[in-house]
Image: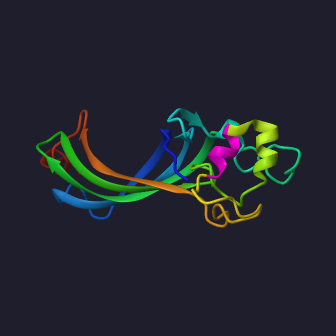
Amino acid sequence: LNFKTSIIEFSVCAELAMVDPYTYFSFPYCFGGAGIFRFNPFSYDNDNNKTFLRPLRTEGQGLAAFPDRKPYSLTQFCIPFGVGWKVNLKNSFQLSYEFGYRYLFTDYLDDVSKRYVSLTTLEQEKGPISAQMSYRKKEPFNEEGEVRGNSKVRDLYFFTGFKIAVWLGRKSKEENSTAL
């Protein structure tokens, strides 16, 4: 099985500097918050056509034959958290490097969570592409119920990168200490 997806996220986070940022020009920090993200997993079928996976119900989600499998939403909540290192540059700039995780409340970021369902049922209900995209192995299908994913562990994603921040109206360290 394979997939790709684009993720669009909106989140609000708070940062906590581990030391006084007015005393040190470089310092570690951590962050955490809440967010919403949107995704839409896809893959390429045997004819190399881009195929979105959710409408195919590759694990039987929403089909009458599998009442315990509900369709998943493409918009989900997440909890962003992570750590970083900031460097104050001049008076108004900061350069940061951070590493952040996103704890998710879905196991379908990759359209894989539970066990295989009947390929015959998928083909009858959703068409041959659904069955093809559900089972991508080269060898023949063993049996319904074979492990496809791990529903006990939710998906997550992480990122790393550099940021440049501009402080608007920030006082210098000297101005700040004389104001106290």
Q: Is residue 73 visible?
A: no
User: In the figure, is residue 56 to the left or right of 22?
Assistant: right
On the image, the x and y values in percent for residue 99 come to 35, 57
* Occupied quadrant, residue 153: bottom right
| Vertical order, 127 against 144 (above or below) | above
Residue 178 image position (x, y, % from top left):
16, 49
**In the image, residue 17 lies in the stretch drawn in magenta:** no
Residue at image coords 63%, 45%:
133
Residue sitting nearer the eye, 4 or 104? 4
Q: Which residues are magenta?
A: 129-135
Whether residue 52 is visible to the viewer of this picture, yes or no, is yes
Q: Nearer the viewer, residue 94 or 7?
A: 7
Point 71% across, 61% down: residue: 115
Residue at x-position 81% and y-position 38%:
125
Secondary structure mostly seen in magenta is helix
Residue at 72% from the left image edge and 51% from the top image edge: 59
Residue toward you, 68 or 166? 68
Q: Position of residue 23 (x, y in %)?
A: 18, 59
Residue 120 placement, left or right of 129? right
The image shows residue 98 at horizontal and vertical percentages of 31, 54
